Amino acid sequence: MIIIAESGSTKCHWILCNKNGEIKKEFKTIGLNPYFTKKNEIINTLKKSEINEFKQTIKTIFFYGAGCLEKEKRKIIKDALQNVFTQAIIKIKHDLEAACLALYKNEPNITCILGTGSNSCYYDGKNITKNSPSLGFMIGDEASGNYFGKKILNLYFNNLLPKDLKSKLKEKYEIDIAIVKNKLYNSARPNMFLAKYFPFISENKDHPFIYRLIYNILEEFITVHVKSYKNHSSVKINFVGSVAFYLKDEIEFLMKKHKVKLGDIIKDPIYNLVKYHSKNINNY
């Protein structure tokens, strides 16, 4: 049996399938980003998951994860997986590669991730040849869920939100400044905490104030991460991730404004990854 896993910072989606791509079981765990998740936490998460029941039958694991660009970070994930799945061959790759494989349609493109974090690259069909660097939630991640969370909290605490939006935010979201600061500076996953405010953005995107905020933030992402590629006007721009999915209309509008070609927007790449690996399993 084969496991294909796609992990952001918030959640990891696991699919157990055979080599023909027939899905036998699906699992969800917390996101296993090596910047925020230690080896022992990964091991404990897997051993408590239902996936642990199948560990003896799993022979190959393809893990695509946020934070897995650098060799030392990939090693954290691989060592943890090998501890649990002792019989498996394990291959660790970056989540950008998952997005590229899931969205590729026989022509070079620019692939973007807009989820808890954000990233982008130029994919030629075989390799990521250029990558606009992801600088993380502290100084980067433009247009990501955590980026929107930072913006909305900043506006709230500086009394810059309209009264009706302030009232709505109070109803469903944490706005105690002491708790917010503690979550940001003393928790293991501050980026996930910030991303929890993104639903407020998508729920209120028809409000003129929120619409302008979305417009400005997405335009910043396009300027910094799409237009940084010299050939951005000649290839399609693909998007993957929950933020991209829920702001699909706004992205489409801005693509037209900037005269770039929008490709596909999908929420979750994993089902396309299952199809990809079922066709290419003999190459591994």
Image (tube, rainbow, N blue to C red):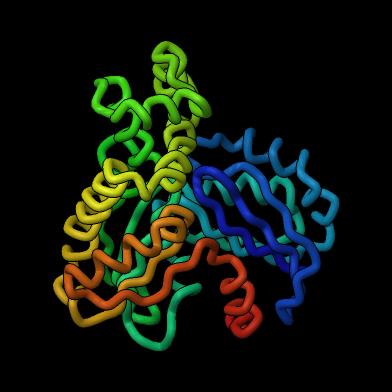
Q: Quadrant of residue 21?
A: bottom right
* Res 284 seen here: no
Q: Residue furthest top?
A: 178
| 16 over 191 or under it: above or below | below
Residue 274 on image: x %, y %: 63, 73
Q: Image quarter for residue 149?
A: top left
Looking at the picture, tell me which residue is in the foreground, 193 or 258: 258
Q: Nearer the viewer, residue 54 or 15?
A: 15
Residue located 38% across and 81% down the image? 125
**Extreme front residue here?**
164
* Residue 19 position (above or below residue 54): below
Q: Residue furthest bottom?
A: 106
Q: Quadrant of the N terminus?
A: bottom right
Vertical side of 270 occupied by 177: above or below: above
Q: Give the residue at x 62% y 78%.
A: 275
Q: How many marks?
A: 0
Residue 213 horizontal/vertical position (percent): 26, 44
Where's residue 17, x and y in %? 75, 70
Quadrant placement of the C terminus:
bottom right
Q: Tell me if I can see residue 254 in this picture.
A: yes
The location of residue 103, given as percent across then percent down, is 45, 75
**Is 102 positioned to the left or the right of 118 in the image?**
right
Judge from the rendering whether residue 230 lies leftward or rightward of residue 90; answer left or right.
left
For residue 165, side relative to residue 92 (left or right): left
Q: Which quadrant would residue 91 be assigned to in this image? A: bottom right
Instruction: State the residue at coordinates (44%, 39%).
Output: 200
Q: Residue at x 59, y 37 (%)?
A: 39
